[in-house]
Image: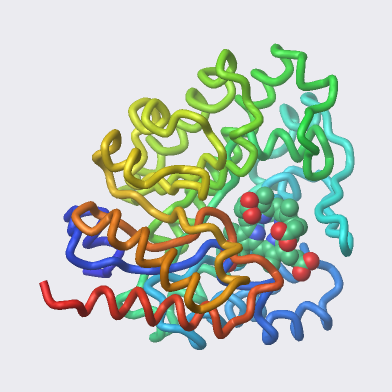
Amino acid sequence: MTPLRKVINKKDSSIKPIWLMRQAGRYLPEFRKIRKQNPNFVKLCLNTNKVKEITLQPIRRYDLDAAIIFSDILMVPFGLGQTVEFKKNFGPYLGSISLRDIKNYDFKLFRKNLEPVYKSINNVKKDKILINKDLIGFVGGPWTILVYMLNKSSPKKKLEKVFSDKMLIKDMLEYINKYLISHIDGQIKSGVNIIQIFDSWAGLVNEKNLNEYIYKPTKKLVKFSKSLKTPCICFPRNIKNYKEYTKIIKPDVISIDYNINPYEIIKNIKIPVQGGMDPRVLLSSKRNLEKSANYYLNAFKNHPYIFNLGHGVLPQTDPSMVEYLIKLVRKFNERPS
Ligand code: CP3
């Protein structure tokens, strides 16, 4: 059984496996080199050889317990025929799409557009380096995908006027969800054995809309993943009430952001927990890093816990700090009990 599986299935609290959100890409010089030669990011995500290479880059470099397939949450809007571009120093830039476009989109065409992702997973999965490691697939949360599809770029603190049209939001979420389910299905069938839902903009939803915009659609994704015997990790970044979220959505693992007090989580949540440490700590000193990593490891000493960050590894991170972090976690695992 893989280290993550021991934590998720057996609720083992004696080992603390580690992988990092956004471990493949951005901060790694070997990724930057490939990226420079591939100016079209979406095309790069569809290049099965390159995807395999990038997915395994952090695994070759470090002693991590899981790989995450190199792709992007915006591959679903791409699969639905929406233009998706990534502009330097700006981030994602999407074309327009309407409710009718999504409603009328050919389901088979969606799967065909994303076929290279599934082929890559199949390829990666066969590599011997993943023996006793998990391969994580992912989707964006329905709400986060909707935000990108309607807002057409990363949202500022406040949302545009279209977001007050509740009927439109509800309808769109329903259709988007069908495609997210299909994308989860495609990834599981080609070899991923854990799904993570990145709901990066969950924190933008008001309490009164949480049920319709977050809970209802996300619950369906978790249920679907579980129905294929694949555990589901949920990361509802900046959500105010992790306890309520966990109770309603019932993920296998809850991934927490860095604003959350781990001791509060342990008091309120019984399922395995992942993450928490502020990725900015990796930009400071080794001493700080040691303090912060040990804070989380000690807090979750007797709780099933997967070490990770409270958001992705930042692009300006020094890879040697990541190496040091992994060493610290391994050292903690080897401590005498
Ligand atoms: O190890 C991994 O996690 C790699 C796979 C991965 C990427 N994006 C590759 C990527 C994953 C899991 C994602 C998730 C993702 N994508 C999220 C959720 C996590 C989060 O950070 O909140 C979101 C919101 C996106 C959308 C997105 N993609 C944005 C906002 C951007 C631009 C800013 C950024 O984060 O880099 C991207 C581009 C992107 N996705 C890059 C990578 C490696 C950088 C591309 C480049 O080199 O320009």
Would you say 157 lies left or right of 278 here?
A: right
Whole-percent x and y of residue 167? 70, 12
Q: Is residue 41 left or right of residue 224?
A: right
270 or 178: nearer the viewer: 270
* Residue that protrudes farthest toward the left in the picture: 337
Q: As displayed, is residue 6 above or below residue 65?
A: above
Q: Quadrant of residue 168?
A: top right
Residue in the image at 49% along x and 87% along y: 60
**Does residue 43 appear in this view?**
no
* The quarter of the displayed image where residue 27 is located: bottom right
Q: Position of residue 134 (x, y in %)?
A: 37, 68
Residue under the image location 59 percent in, 34 percent down: 202
The C terminus: image quadrant: bottom left
Q: Is residue 260 visible?
A: yes
Q: Which residue is drawn at 29% across and 33% down?
A: 268
User: Which residue is more in the foreground, 329 or 209?
Assistant: 329
Residue 33: percent from the left, percent from the top?
76, 85
- Judged from the image, the quadrant occupied by ligand 1 is bottom right
Q: In which quarter of the image is the N terminus?
A: bottom left
Q: Give the quadrant of residue 207.
A: top right
When the figure is inspected, residue 202 is found, relative to residue 134, above or below; the finding is above
Q: Is residue 20 left or right of residue 244?
A: right
265 in relation to 130, above or below: above
Count the labels in the image. 0
Residue visible at 62% across and 20% down in the picture: 206
